[in-house]
Image (tube, rainbow, N blue to C red):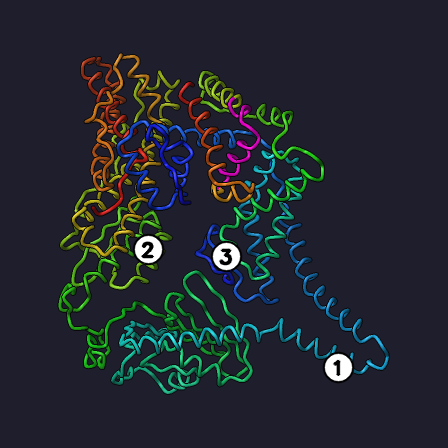
Amino acid sequence: MKRKRWQDQQGHPPADLLLLHIEGELERSDATQLSLHLAQCPSCRQLCAQLELGGSQFAAFQQSVVLPEAALRLGALQESLRAAQNARSSGSLATRLRALFTFHSGPRFALGTASALIALIAGLSWYLGTPRQSVYASQILADAVHASDAMTAKSKVLHQKVRLQRGNLIIERNVHHGRSTAQQAKEPSIDAQFQHALDLAHINLDDPLNANDFAAWRAAEPRRNDKVNGTAQSVTISTRVKGEEIAESSLTLSRSDWRPIARSVEFRGETPIEISEESYDISDVAGSSPDLAAHGLAASPVPSPNSSSATGVSIDELETSEIDLREALNGLGAEASANARIWRADDEVYYQSDATDPGLLQKLKLAARSIPHVTPGTEKSAPLPGEDHAVSGSSPYPPNPASELEARLGGPQQAGEFLETLRGRYTRAIAEAAALDKLGKRYPLETMKRLPPDLQTRVNNLAATMLSALQHDSAEYIKTLSPVMDDFAQEHRVAAAGDDAANVPGCLHWQENAALAEPRLLSLGETTSRLLARGQTLVPEPAETEQLIGESLAARSFLQRHLMSTCQVFGSN
Amino acid sequence: MAQAFSGSGHHDTAVRLVGASPHMNEELTRYVSELYQEHSRSLFRHMMLSGSSAAEADDLIQEAFLRLCRHLGSGQQVDNPKSWLLRVLHNFRIDQVRKYKRELTLEQPEFDFLVSQLHATGPDAEQQLIADEKLEHLQEAIAKLTPRQYQYLLLRADGLKLREIAELFRVTVQTVSESCARAMLELGRLSDET
């Protein structure tokens, strides 16, 4: 939303504008202007905090009202849905028939009416049947062939690492589309029966993922039935045929560039063939090497000034792969929870994690497989900046409830539950802080300035997501800890930390915030755990207790006023 | 999620039927059923807090999902199914208001009943008292909101953007934003006091 006015008479933005800013509904220019103002204005930051608090109060009200349980009537809904769909089909037919008979109402038109009725039924069955899908499939295939031709016209070469599997037999090929390629040597293990199957399905072993070949096979099948399915990333054309040997074949295309990424062929009574893209790359024709291609090796473009090494992978390509990987890890929550590490060697981006959940491991593997130049690693060499940073995942909180805490909370069970919750929330917050700090050290301001603008934006967006998770988890941790900490402070008469300039450094870049957050969280964890553990010793040491309380309050105040502030700078300059 | 729809695996992303034809009907039914299981409870809560009776909320929610099915079946796109359903339900409520000449928001007796059902939990009797006291203050503050403020905050809490709320009520975003900001500041101040 574009705002013409954004300052009141005192030079502050009004509360409604701050709310639009918090909700992310301001245009970029206004949002930037407002961020700059917030960086310098504690009273507006306070107002933002109050708005957010008000919103959470209303949410608390909404969730606290006890209502009758909704009766889930899924069966009734499904019945209504099916009835509506049937009514729609028959309704449209009935309407058309009625219109037809109304028009040809006289007996002399009986023959014409009957002919028209047959034509209408035939038309409707054509309309409702497969031809509509068939036309759609043809259009998609034409687009894929056109996209491939356009790439050749632009002197680009698509390099694909392709995996073909039939039963236990696995063949991997490196294919280069967009220029003439020397014939690759046939695999010696292919027998005549397999070659026959490949020929039937129009699969060229030197280029198994080819939209043209699939289109040629499909066109040669007179009795076919097409189905088109889609996801956000890909479209799959599945064609069932009435032939004696092949039952169905499908081709999956990437939505981003109509590149074929998978193909399968199902035979009647024989093992199917599955073909999939393992990785891909696009380079200029000048950089490709036909000699290497002839031996099935990856193309090696001539190193450009922006190349990282003789293997020809440019720095930007590696940066993009690394950021793709970081986004994927973040999307899976693996950066913080599974302590994922990333490093580069030999023009590849490697990753390793401590994940033990098989589901997460599988997702990680699948995500990484779709990113070029990314390989799972087991041994670190030349870690990237920030990656050698040790993540403190263990909680400092004592395993047994302290006696003082037991007295405060009403018993050992309550104290134990409290410590368990605290330990969990602390562990999550510190893992988030360490992950963000690692990202900040990997992409300090100087590095950010050297990145292309689109990659800068992606790193900033990734940081914003991680910061938001850190803010949420830190707030949960502090919310749990605060009642006990405030009790300690009140009892020992320790005043809350002051609001001096050193304590609130103002608006900082996210990298600086990331560097400050982790030590403060560690400090808060350590001081409060020592306080809680002291109760067990039953040896009163008032001076040290007061010092620990003071340090805890200062760390909490810093985190609340600074880390959780809405004032964060995302940029490269 | 059904393969026949574009989307990235969860239901808050854009969905659109790819090539509507009869064999897609079953996919569509399955997809809308998944959405029903995911959202019907929170939509029911929203309708109850908007002043609907339980039976009325139930009927309207069924009708809204049927409408969603028809909408998707005609090949149209829905960017965020929950927001779409909330908007349809809001329009149903307006129709109800016109039909029965009722208030759009909660009427006082209904509101009083709901807030009397506010449920506070604390680990012990003392904490329970504190929680009860906080809820009592919250109840008083929410009772002071104007009907419009209450509706705006309810829709916002259910995930609608201020821009979407403005479109729904046919007012400017600034109107919604000003109204929400005033209400939220009041509620935020309350938290400082308690």
Residue bounds of the magenta highlight: B141-159
Q: Nearer the viewer, residue A570 or A123?
A: A570
Q: Residue at x 46, y 76 (%)?
A: A249
Q: Circle 3: is it few (<14), some (14-19), or many (20+) Cα within 10 Å?
A: many
Element under label 3? loop
Element under label 1? helix
Q: Which residue is mark 2?
A: A364
Amino acid tagged 1? Ser
Amino acid tagged 2? Leu
Amino acid tagged 3? Val
Against B115, residue A280 (above or below) is below
B114 sits left or right of A100 in the view: left
Q: Nearer the viewer, residue A13 or B150?
A: A13
Q: Which residue is mark 1?
A: A115
Read off the chain for label 1: A
Element under label 2? helix
Mark with earlier residue (2, 1):
1
Which marked residue is nearer to the observer: mark 3 or mark 2?
Answer: 3
Quote the CA–CA distance across marks 3 and 2: 25 Å
Q: Quadrant of residue A393?
A: top left
Which marked residue is nearer to the observer: mark 1 or mark 3?
Answer: 1
Against B59, residue A543 (above or below) is above
Q: Please check the rendered image and state whether residue B157 is part of the magenta-colored stretch, yes or no.
A: yes
Q: Position of residue A198 (x, y in %)?
A: 39, 83
Quote the CA–CA distance across marks 1 and 3: 41 Å
Give the tally of numbered discs: 3
Answer whether residue A494 is visible to the viewer in this image.
Answer: yes
Which marked residue is nearer to the observer: mark 2 or mark 1?
Answer: 1
Answer whether residue A45 is visible to the viewer in this image.
Answer: no
Q: Residue at x 33, y 24 (%)?
A: A482
